[in-house]
Amino acid sequence: MMYEILKKYPLCDRCFGRLFAKLLHATNIERGRALKIYKLLEIEKKINKGEADENDYELLKAILRSGCNKTRLNMEIKKESCPWCRGIFEKDKIERLLNKAINLLKEYDFNTFLIGTHLPEDIKELEEEIKTEYMESIKQEFGREFGKLLAIRLNKQPDKENPDIVVHINPYTEEIYLQVNPLFIKGRYRKLVRGISQTIWLCGKCKGKGCEICNYTGKKYPSSVEEIIAKPIMEATKGKDEKFHGAGREDVDVRMLGDGRPFIIEIKEPKIRNIDLKKIEEEINKDGRVEVLNLSFAKRKDVIAYKNTPHKKTYRALVECSEKVSEEDLKKLERELENRIIKQRTPKRVLHRRADLERIRKVYKVKTNKVDDNHFEMIIYCDGGLYIKELISGDDGRTKPSVSSILNKPCICKELDVLKVHDNETGDINGRNE
């Protein structure tokens, strides 16, 4: 029976009501007190009629020990402390915890929060022992009730899905610490110059420590798209660290043009979240090497979408051929590569850091333009993940077919630009979205 638990554990009204939280639309205190009073009335009625047995008296004493002294019977039973809540909802304790949390939060600019309640192991074991089908954990109730009070004090909103900060509390030990969730900012970047990497590239020799080879910078390349974009954002947010997430990447010697490549920058443990993105956009674009477009706030789930969604690309390549190239050669190249499946093993130049796999990609359309006898321009619309330099050179037969194999003339890529990343849409040969 539901009341038998009181014989073993003198649960207070709140905790007894929590055992049946999903049955009656009332607070746990109201529910627990009502259930106890109902049973007291029943027992007192039986006693007055002389129908009470030993079990009734045992239950009567258990209810009185739990603090519900509503009977007219002349019984002096000392109230015992509740072994489940142990007074964590007492006003003085709640006030101490509120002040402690507010003091920790005062150095952060944020909009939403969530309470993360932590229970000692013996409380978890007790809950497991007395668990009912309709029970609510004390963890849920404390988080809900404390969250309401903190929201009023801070004039902030609780958010179960994407809180800016999680306030972790063990109400039994009064330990509190903060989990400051990352701030995500998305946009598109254009890399206007060659010679800078997308992300920070550590020196292969010292792995970032600094040595003679890297001129003690710890980096293989002096600058990156990541650093240029991150610097003003880190200054504005006072974040602890950052991570750059791009929808693919281009080589160091490749420009990213058109309307740019989608990216998300993740700012870890930001102290300030409400920042002027337009102002930051203008600050980044002063650099001249990298431009950002359409900065806006993002969510964690957007990172997964950027990483896992394949995007078709449109490229411009300047090709150099060791032999003369005719207009007929170029027309043949356009015909041969239209809607062509390309089998491509991992290029030799990246084998030291990538697995040796065969990739199947597709070229949808190619347009060519002759520059001189030994040079021509290609506009290539293809699947993402296709290595364009190797599509041109053939990479000693590791890419089939290739520009070199189709023309039967050794060719190399002299310049390469990304003209369009076709995210969420298809595209045409000119880099425009259809």
Image (spheres, rainbow, N blue to C red):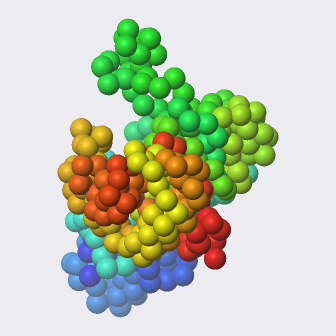
Task: Name the spot of residue 28 as percent of width and height, x first.
Answer: 49, 70
Give the position of the N terminus as an image quadrant: bottom left
Task: Name the spot of residue 273 as percent of width and height, x first.
Answer: 67, 43
Q: Going 59% across and 51% down the picture, which residue do you hit?
A: 371
Position of residue 50 in the picture relative to residue 200 (left or right): left
Q: Is residue 51 visible?
A: yes
Q: Is residue 243 visible?
A: no
Position of residue 119 in the picture relative to residue 371 (left or right): left
Number of numbered discs overlaid on the protein picture: 0
Q: Quadrant of residue 78?
A: bottom left
29 versus 99 height, above or below: below
Give the position of the C terminus as an image quadrant: bottom right
Nearer to me, 110 or 12: 110
Q: Quadrant of residue 138?
A: bottom left
Q: Going 43% across and 11% down the picture, which residue do you hit?
A: 216
Q: Going 37% across and 79% down the picture, which residue do you hit?
A: 134
Q: Going 71% across and 31% down the picture, which residue do you hit?
A: 287
Position of residue 207 in the picture relative to residue 103 (left or right): left
Task: Name the spot of residue 166 as percent of width and height, x first.
Answer: 52, 48
Nearer to me, 326 or 303: 326
Task: Name the spot of residue 192 as percent of width and height, x first.
Answer: 64, 40
